[in-house]
C-alpha cells in the first residue's frame, strides 16, 4: 500500500504527465521582469549605487523603505507587465536574504491598486538560495549536491515555502491556475550530482506544495538541467535558456515557448558588454520572444542597475541638476525602457494607463527648489506626498509657464485626455502640446484645497488612431498641484 506521501507524489506526477501529453501551444502571452533586491535595509533599498550607468531616477528615502517599493511598483504598472519575479535567495543561514522580506511588495501592489494587474512569480536565484546558502551552512565552497535529499531543505523549506507563506494566493502569478516557479540555472558549476536527482527534487517540491498549500506548481527549469538530468523532462512543465550569451533566447520545450530578454548587460568597458544601442537591443529582444509567440517572457531585470540591465526610469540629471548624457546612462530618456517594454505588452494602448507627474521624462519652467534636497528625483521640481486616492506623490505648487513632458506616449484612438489636479484657486489654466503643436488652453475648476483632487477632461485633442506621441503639459499661470494624466 502506498504511503500518504507516496500517494500525493504519484498524483502530482500523474497530473503533470497528463498535462504534458495533451497540452496544445498556449495562446496567452505573459510578460514579466526579475526584481533584484536583498529585501532588507540594504543599499539596494535605501539608496542606489551611483557608480553604475543605469542609476535609478528615484532617490530612496532612508526613513521610508516602503516608499521604494511603492515607487518601483508604480513604474511596473506603467511598464504594463503581467508579473514581477523577485529574486528568491533562501532564508538560512543568511537570514537577510529571506523571501519573507518581500511582504512590502504585496502591500505596495494592494495600496496602488495594481494587485489585479501585476502578480508575483517565484524566480529562484538558485546559485544563491541553493549553492551559497548550503555552502554557508556547511562551510564549503562546492556546487550544490542535489543528490542528497537532506539538502532539499534549501530548495523548499527555507526557500519556496517561505515565499508562498509570504505571497498570498491572490497575488501569485499562475499559468493554468498553477503558481509559477522559475529556476535560474542548472549548470554544473552551481549544481552537481543531477542525473536522476534533479527530477526527484522537483517531485519533492510538487509533493510539498500540494501538502502545504494545495497546489501543483508550474515549474520552469534551465535547459542545462535538462541536459544534466535526462529524467527531468518528464517532471517539469517548461524550460528557459537564460541569455545564451546574447540578449534573448526562445526555448520550445513541452510544446511551450519560454523567452528571456535583456535590454543590455554590463558596462562598455567590459569584454562581455551587450550594447543597449539606444533601446534597439531591448526592442529586438522582445520581438524575438514576446512577438515570436512565447507563452511567457522574463525580462532581466527591472531593478538590475548593478549589471546595467535595468528597465526602470533612470536619472537624466545628476545631484546638481546637470544633464547626464546617453554615454553616462545608456538611456536616451528616463522612461525609454519602460516604454519599449509596454509596447510589447498585451495591452500597449491601455485606456487605464496613468502617467505620474513625478515620472515625466523632462520638466522645466520652475524657479526655486522642492523644499527637500534630491527628494524623489534630482532637479528643480517640487514633489511631495499626496493625499489623493491611491497615495504616492504629486508635483506641487506649479508655477507660471512650468511644464512637464513625456516621450513616446501611446494614445488610444479618440480617447479623452484627462488630468488630475488640485487647487484652492480659480482661473487656473493649462494646455497640452502634442508633438510640438500647442492645443487650446482650458480653465480649471477650483477644487477647494491643495489636496482636494478632481479629474479634468480635455477631450480627444483630435487624435483618431492608436499612435505614439510626445506629450507636454504646460501650466499657463500655475497655482495648482498635479498628480497624473491619462488618455
Image (cartoon, rainbow, N blue to C red):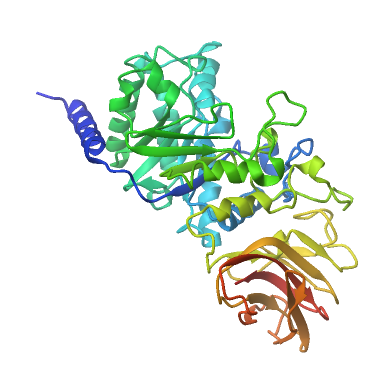
Residue 276 located left or right of residue 129: right
Which quadrant does the C terminus fall into? bottom right
Residue 295 located left or right of residue 478: left
Please indicate, yes or no, whether residue 302 appears anywhere in the rendered image. no
Q: Residue at position x 28%, y 31% from top?
A: 207
Q: Residue at position x 63%, y 79% from top?
A: 462
Could you say where residue 344 lies in the image, as x and y percent from the top left?
A: 53, 52
Residue 439 located left or right of residue 351: right
Residue 413 located left or right of residue 274: left
Could you say where residue 135 lies in the image, as x and y percent from the top left?
A: 53, 15
Please give the count of numbered marks on the rendered protein. 0
Q: Residue at position x 52%, y 22% from top?
A: 133
Could you say where residue 369 lies in the image, as x and y percent from the top left?
A: 87, 62
Q: Residue at position x 83%, y 46% from top?
A: 325
Q: Nearer the viewer, residue 204 or 437?
A: 437
Q: Quadrant of residue 308?
A: top right
Looking at the image, is 238 positioned above or below residue 314? above
Q: Nearer the viewer, residue 27 or 122?
A: 27
Which quadrant does the N terminus fall into? top left
Please indicate, yes or no, whether residue 249 appears anywhere in the rendered image. yes
Q: Nearer the viewer, residue 74 or 149?
A: 74
Looking at the image, is 70 positioned above or below residue 247? below
Could you say where residue 483 lies in the image, as x and y percent from the top left?
A: 68, 69
Q: Quadrant of residue 230?
A: top left
Q: Residue furthest left?
A: 1
Amino acid at each position: 500500500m502506498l504511503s500518504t506521501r507516496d500517494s500525493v507524489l504519484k498524483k502530482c506526477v500523474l497530473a503533470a504527465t497528463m498535462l504534458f501529453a495533451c497540452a496544445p501551444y498556449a495562446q496567452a502571452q505573459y510578460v514579466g521582469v526579475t526584481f533584484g533586491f536583498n529585501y532588507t535595509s540594504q543599499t539596494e533599498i535605501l539608496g542606489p549605487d551611483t557608480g553604475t550607468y543605469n542609476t535609478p531616477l528615484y532617490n530612496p528615502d532612508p526613513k521610508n523603505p516602503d516608499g521604494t517599493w511603492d515607487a518601483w511598483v508604480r513604474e511596473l504598472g506603467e511598464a504594463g507587465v503581467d508579473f514581477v519575479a523577485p529574486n528568491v535567495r533562501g532564508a538560512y543561514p543568511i537570514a537577510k536574504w529571506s523571501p519573507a522580506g518581500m511582504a512590502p511588495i504585496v502591500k505596495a501592489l494592494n495600496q496602488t491598486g495594481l494587485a489585479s494587474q501585476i502578480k508575483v512569480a517565484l524566480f529562484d536565484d538558485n546559485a544563491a538560495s541553493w549553492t551559497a546558502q548550503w555552502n554557508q551552512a556547511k562551510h564549503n565552497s562546492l556546487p550544490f549536491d542535489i543528490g542528497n535529499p537532506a539538502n532539499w531543505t534549501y530548495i523548499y523549506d527555507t526557500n519556496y515555502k517561505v515565499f508562498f507563506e509570504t505571497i498570498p494566493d491572490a497575488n501569485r502569478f499562475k499559468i493554468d491556475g498553477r503558481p509559477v516557479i522559475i529556476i535560474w540555472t542548472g549548470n554544473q558549476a552551481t549544481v552537481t550530482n543531477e542525473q536522476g536527482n534533479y527530477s526527484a527534487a522537483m517531485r519533492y517540491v510538487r509533493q510539498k506544495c500540494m501538502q502545504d498549500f494545495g497546489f501543483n506548481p508550474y515549474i520552469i527549469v534551465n535547459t542545462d538541467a535538462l541536459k544534466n538530468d535526462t529524467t527531468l523532462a518528464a517532471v517539469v512543465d517548461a524550460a528557459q535558456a537564460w541569455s545564451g550569451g546574447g540578449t534573448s533566447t526562445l526555448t520550445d520545450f513541452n510544446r511551450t515557448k519560454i523567452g528571456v530578454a535583456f535590454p543590455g548587460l554590463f558596462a562598455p568597458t567590459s569584454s562581455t558588454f551587450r550594447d543597449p544601442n539606444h533601446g534597439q537591443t531591448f526592442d529586438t529582444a522582445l520581438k524575438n520572444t514576446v512577438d515570436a509567440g512565447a507563452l511567457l517572457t522574463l525580462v532581466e531585470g527591472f531593478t538590475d542597475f548593478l549589471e546595467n540591465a535595468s528597465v526602470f526610469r533612470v536619472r537624466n540629471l545628476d545631484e546638481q541638476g546637470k544633464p547626464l548624457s546617453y554615454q553616462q546612462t545608456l538611456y536616451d530618456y528616463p522612461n525609454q525602457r519602460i516604454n519599449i517594454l509596454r509596447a510589447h505588452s498585451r495591452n500597449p494602448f491601455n485606456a487605464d494607463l496613468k502617467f505620474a507627474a513625478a515620472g515625466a521624462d523632462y520638466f522645466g519652467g520652475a524657479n526655486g527648489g522642492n523644499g527637500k534636497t534630491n527628494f524623489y528625483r534630482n532637479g528643480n521640481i517640487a514633489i511631495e506626498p499626496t493625499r489623493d486616492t491611491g497615495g504616492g506623490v504629486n508635483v506641487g505648487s506649479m508655477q507660471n509657464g512650468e511644464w512637464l513632458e513625456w516621450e513616446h506616449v501611446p494614445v488610444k484612438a479618440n480617447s479623452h485626455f484627462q488630468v488630475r489636479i488640485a487647487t484652492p484657486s480659480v482661473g487656473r489654466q493649462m494646455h497640452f502640446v502634442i508633438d510640438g503643436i500647442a492645443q487650446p488652453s482650458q480653465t480649471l475648476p477650483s477644487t477647494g484645497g491643495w489636496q482636494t483632487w478632481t479629474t479634468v477632461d480635455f477631450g480627444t485633442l483630435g487624435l483618431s488612431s492608436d499612435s505614439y506621441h510626445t506629450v507636454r503639459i504646460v501650466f499657463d499661470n500655475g497655482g495648482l498641484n498635479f498628480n497624473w494624466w491619462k488618455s
